Amino acid sequence: MMDGTLPPADTAVIPAQTAVARPLRVLHIVESAATGVGRHLLDLLEGTLAQGHGADVLFSPTREDDIFRQGRARLTNVHFRAIAMRRAPTPTDLKALWAVKRHMASFGPYDIIHGHSSKGGMLARLAGIGTKARVVYTPHAISTLDPNLTGPKRALFHVGEVALACLTDQIIAVSTGEREHIIGLGIPADKVTTITNGIEPPVTAPRDDTRRELGLAPHHLAIGFVGRLTAHKGIDILIDSFARAHAVAPHARLIIIGDGDAGDDARTRAEALGCSTAITWLGARDAVRYYGAFDLLAQPSRYEGLSYTLLEAAGLGLPIIATDVGGTRDVIVDDVTGVVSPSHEAAPGAFADLLCALVTDPGRLARYADAAFAHVGPGGRARMVTRTLSLYQSLL
């Protein structure tokens, strides 16, 4: 989108809604009930209940965060059940599948079985065999998007996704880029629908209060990062890029919200590059209150579906620099609402070059901020829920 026009929200057409005389019963299966996936599911559950439908959730207790845990406590009309699931494929998946089938025998039947992310999607597809339920799968950044997935492992995941697609009524891509990738795997286009994530623009804490809490002086330029500290999210790219940006703009500060298995390496990297004193590590917490303190959001992910962090930042009028992966261009219009950088694999060093240019051009940041708020407005979450329910009903 180099011409400054705004991209469409959803590109695939959902079949006309079929009238359903009774409330739907939906079973959601999710292994990674944290960050964006967990939030998406909570939003979907709240919308489902509000429209009179019912839902049960099978989740892994080892991969939920505080936000999902609090959501479980709040949604008392949803039956949440913890079952043992592991992220990587293991023989214990058979035990997890048996637990799913036992749950369905006790609490079913269901109209829809909806699997989220790779493991939840696999279990949903296999559990649907021999039932009348329609099966829906939302990858939330399908595994084959990962540029570090190579060789036999990539081939195995590719074959697995294509095979499981035969057991799937519809796959929901959360961005146009993800839909194109899924179709490119050889999965029929009429099985893949784009329903982008949606939010209500969040209410952030007063800027002066949060900047004071973070120890930021009025002249500091605050760059925010919100996400897991992993190679997937590009935390190594972020530290390298910030070190260069801090060298040309000593008033720049980096605020990192999140935790993950690459956190210790990131801290060591920052110390080695001499920029650690300009970085504040907040750990995992509710990031919304801190957005107002930022002057710029940075997201150097190696792959994505459609990031809630980008949606929130854009909805608050916060300039963004993000890599050209997944749904980035569904949120950012390059050089209008932010900067879209080539991915690290496509152009190593490009993210750092662009970040350096931004931190030395405050007028450009102000222009992006004005355009960003106009691009992502209220109603996005309601649209996401309505389109998902319409998809469910079209399958029955």
Image (tube, rainbow, N blue to C red):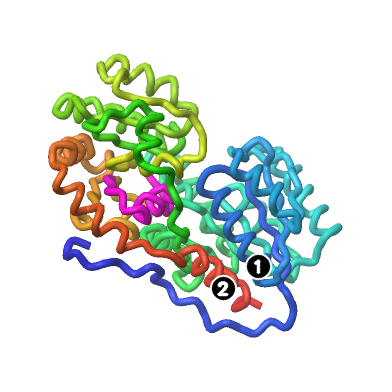
| Residue 36 seen in the figure | yes
Residue beneath the point at 41% across and 60% down = 175
Q: Position of residue 26 (x, y in %)?
A: 70, 64
- Residue 135 falls in image quadrant: bottom right
Residue beneath the point at 45% across and 42% down = 289
Specify the amino acid type for callout 2.
Answer: Leu
Q: Position of residue 321 (x, y in %)?
A: 27, 45
Q: Classify 60 as above or below 120.
A: above
The reply, left or right, for residue 98 in relation to residue 395 is right
Disc 2 or 1, which lies upstream in sequence? Answer: 1
In the rendered image, residue 302 lying in the magenta stretch gets the answer yes
In the drawing, what numbered circle is on residue 50? Answer: 1
Mark nearer the viewer, 2 or 1: 1
Specify the amino acid type for callout 1.
Answer: Ala
How many numbered callouts? 2
Q: Classify 178 as above or below 231.
A: below
In depth, the one of 88 and 343 nearer the eye is: 343
Q: Position of residue 67 (x, y in %)?
A: 59, 43
**Do callouts 2 and 1 mark residues in contact (Cβ within 8 Å)?**
no
In the drawing, what numbered circle is on residue 391? Answer: 2
The reply, left or right, for residue 313 in relation to residue 86 is left
Residue beneath the point at 65% across and 71% down = 51
- Residue 207 falls in image quadrant: top left
Q: Residues within 10 Å of mark 2 (few under 14, many from 20)?
A: many
In the drawing, what numbered circle is on residue 99? Answer: none
Q: Residues within 10 Å of mark 1 (few under 14, many from 20)?
A: few
Q: Classify 275 as above or below 284.
A: above
Quadrant in which the C terminus appears: bottom right
For the magenta stretch, what is the residue range? 301-321
